[in-house]
Amino acid sequence: MKKSVAVLGLGRYGTSLAKSLYDMGADVLVADINEDKIEEMKDHCTVAVCADLENEEEIKALDIKNMDTVVCAMGRNLAASIMIVAVAKELGVPLVVAKSSSERMSSILRKVGADKIIIPEDFGGNQSARILLSDNFMDYFQVDDNLSMIEIKPRESWVGKSLIELELRKKYKLNVVAVRNGGSNWAFIDPNRKLTEETTLLVIIETSELHRISK
């Protein structure tokens, strides 16, 4: 089933993200106050709407309550970012992601309800799109220009098998750093222990290889 994503704000990052999501098969709604940007995006999304994203009623009129994910890509516009995140959470959107330009902004957006924060300097639009459309990526950050650290749920085909059996390092060029089950603390993993549906893996992987473990 297609995932539906609203990308609100069409700066360089929002535009790149929306195009990547659409190219990967998602239903994509985009919105921005700039009519020229909306016109440019009409062939690269499902729906494009010109809207004032600092206005609560105009945000609600976008019908984002039916979206799987809302991405606030407003960059340095803190007022609009707060409004988008707050409205999306009020409407019950399952996943609200916000672009941030500083630690202070990240802290504020988390307080008003953002589920995840994306810093575009760490993840570009294409990489963000892969992560947002994946069923198993949970959290992530870029260690340096080459490596990323990801919290990931096991694929269905991994459940019931051990790391030794799966040979993840050989097949996906990743290293499992730690593991936790349910709400437990992170711990080093026994390579002979079978993975379950409750398992979360903390892995390090080359950023260029992220597509290999996304569904």
Image (cartoon, rainbow, N blue to C red):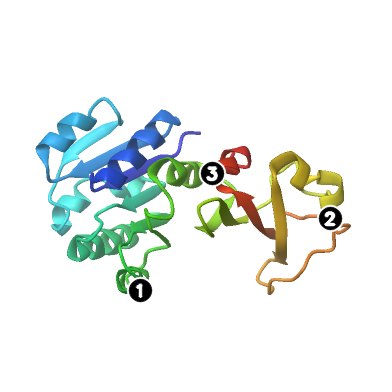
Q: Which residue is mark 1?
A: 107
Q: Residue furthest right?
A: 192
In the drawing, what numbered circle is on residue 134?
A: 3
> In terms of image quadrants, where is residue 101?
bottom left
Upstream in the sequence, badge 2 or badge 3? 3
Name the side, left or right, on which 76 lies relative to 167. left
Residue 162 visible (yes or no): no
Instruction: In this rendered view, identify the residue nearer to me: 102 or 74.
Output: 102
Residue 73 visible (yes or no): yes
Mark 3 near mark 1, Cβ–Cβ under 8 Å?
Answer: no
Mark 2 near mark 1, Cβ–Cβ under 8 Å?
Answer: no
In the drawing, what numbered circle is on residue 194?
A: 2
User: Residue at (70%, 42%) from the top-left corner?
Assistant: 172
User: What count of labels does the image hold?
Assistant: 3
In the rendered image, the quadrant that contains the C terminus is top right
Helix, strand, or loop for circle 2?
A: loop
* Of the two numbered discs 2 and 1 in the rendering, the one whose residue sits closer to the viewer: 1
Name the side, left or right, on which 28 lies relative to 153. left
Amino acid residing under circle 3:
Ser
* Of the two numbered discs 3 and 1 in the rendering, the one whose residue sits closer to the viewer: 1
